[in-house]
Amino acid sequence: MLLVVAIAAGDYKDAAAGETATLQNIVMSPCPFDAGHGDVRHARRIRAGAARVWPSTGPCLILGGENKARRHHVMQQQNMGERTPQGTPRHAGPKPLNTPEELRAIRQAMDEGKNPLLATGVPRWEDQVGVSRIINRRVLELEPLPTPAQVLAELPLDSAAQEIVAYSRDEIRACLYGQDDRLLVIVGPCSVHDPNAALDYAHRLSKVMKETEGELLIVMRVYFEKPRTTVGWKGLINDPDIDGSHNIRKGLLLARKTLIGVLGEGLAAATEFLEPTSPQFISDAVSWGAIGARNTESQVHRQLASGMSMPIGFKNATDGSVKAAVNGCYASAQQHTFFGIDHMGRACAVETLGNPDCHVVLRGSIHGPNYDTASVRRAMDDVRAMMPAESAATHGLIIDCSHGNSGKDEHRQAEVVRDIARRIADGEEGITGIMMESFIESGNQPAAPLDQLVYGKSITDRCIGWDETERLLHELADAVSARRWR
């Protein structure tokens, strides 16, 4: 059988006449045509990707094979399919659909929430010219993005910002290892949807940071990626316009600009790492990272954490399993080799040293809270039974006052913060930090385009308002002072 190359995209002329054909996509396939002695037949113009439905006549460039080609009869009627020499019908190739109107119909169906693979009256996406019969059958579009190197070059950290990141990472480590008796406080919006409001919040927080810096190490929560239990808004990076347009290029730049703005206020930043490639674009501006409850058992995220340059907190699983978080800390402390990308966006094998600064974050669960003294003690017992004594995790943990520990109720969250402050003042051990979800306005609101939203109010989980946040931070500072005088 002969192997042929099908010219698959672009405008081209008769190559036999000495004119150069444009080959944008090359497909190896058994030739269904009566191929002769290496001649190139006249090409039919084929649009958008590799030809998967053979026309009745088309370009076949002989690469090798038998001296005489086996003749395959090609059915002339559309959708009748090709027959083998034995007469058995092959898969009937659909009539190619490549008009702009049909492509718009597919896009409109998706915008209306329909599945173009199932909806009636909508051209089937996999029938389009250029859609492979074996790959990318569920992919509508592949949009190139800038490389990490390009984004970092466009929005670099200045020397002052770099100093804040480096110094704050060391301060966080000191708190986690018990070398600094300040309380680590990670506080900020559940998610960033409005960079201007986030920077307004950062400006307010920086003032409180200066007032309490002797007792608290305040790090701003700056979350750009949101894991969803089912579906929903996935965060600023994925959908910065909050309208389903998913302008990831814009989201990456906005996220980085926001981090630079937070650093400009003198604050360190904390974020959750969700997509395994996104850290290449923003991690140089992050001082503390989280692996969320839905991903704490993920090998991909444990490998990622093993190579991160900052401390990483593993949250207990959504079912309450602290063991999952402890296993995550242990796995991330080991060396790993895995698939990744470099700053040029090239696929590469990433070899890591392991991250000894991983630690557990108690965030409650679907079964209830786990911030109480007994839960902290049990969690620390689990950690110390598995982790090396010299690791960060064995010295203490962080309590997330939101999520399962408050039932996502901002009023209940404030009660949790005050309970922890009381226990810190009483000298309870094992708590090295807390996390709070806080924004300018209390509560939350449904996700919508920015011009339809209340300024400074969360579009994901309910948050404590600014006035209450300020009071709570001072109460935590007072608790640390009281502990020192015990």
Image (cartoon, grey):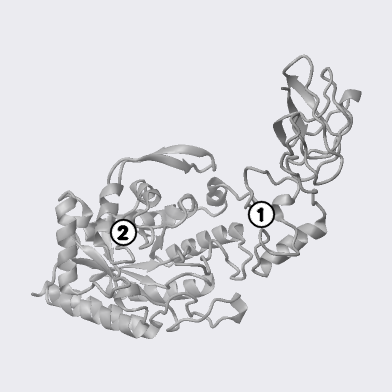
**Disc 2 target residue:** 314
Q: Position of residue 91 (x, y in %)?
A: 71, 42
Q: Position of residue 157 (x, y in %)?
A: 47, 54
Question: Residue at the spot x=69%, y=64% of the render?
Answer: 119
Residue 221 sits in quarter = bottom left
Question: Residue at the spot x=83%, y=46% of the render?
Answer: 78
Mark carried by residue 116: none
> Quarter holding the C terminus?
bottom left
Instruction: Name which of mark 2 and mark 1 comes first in the sequence.
Output: 1
Residue 466 sits in quarter = bottom left
Q: Residues within 10 Å of mark 2 (few under 14, many from 20)?
A: many
From what the image shows, is residue 272 above or below residue 14?
Answer: below
The reply, left or right, for residue 376 in relation to residue 82 is left
Q: Position of residue 278 (x, y in %)?
A: 49, 53
Residue furthest to the right in view is 17
Q: Amino acid at mark 2?
A: Phe
The reply, left or right, for residue 42 in relation to residue 338 is right
Q: Nearer the viewer, residue 353 or 284?
A: 353
Q: Amino acid at mark 1?
A: Leu
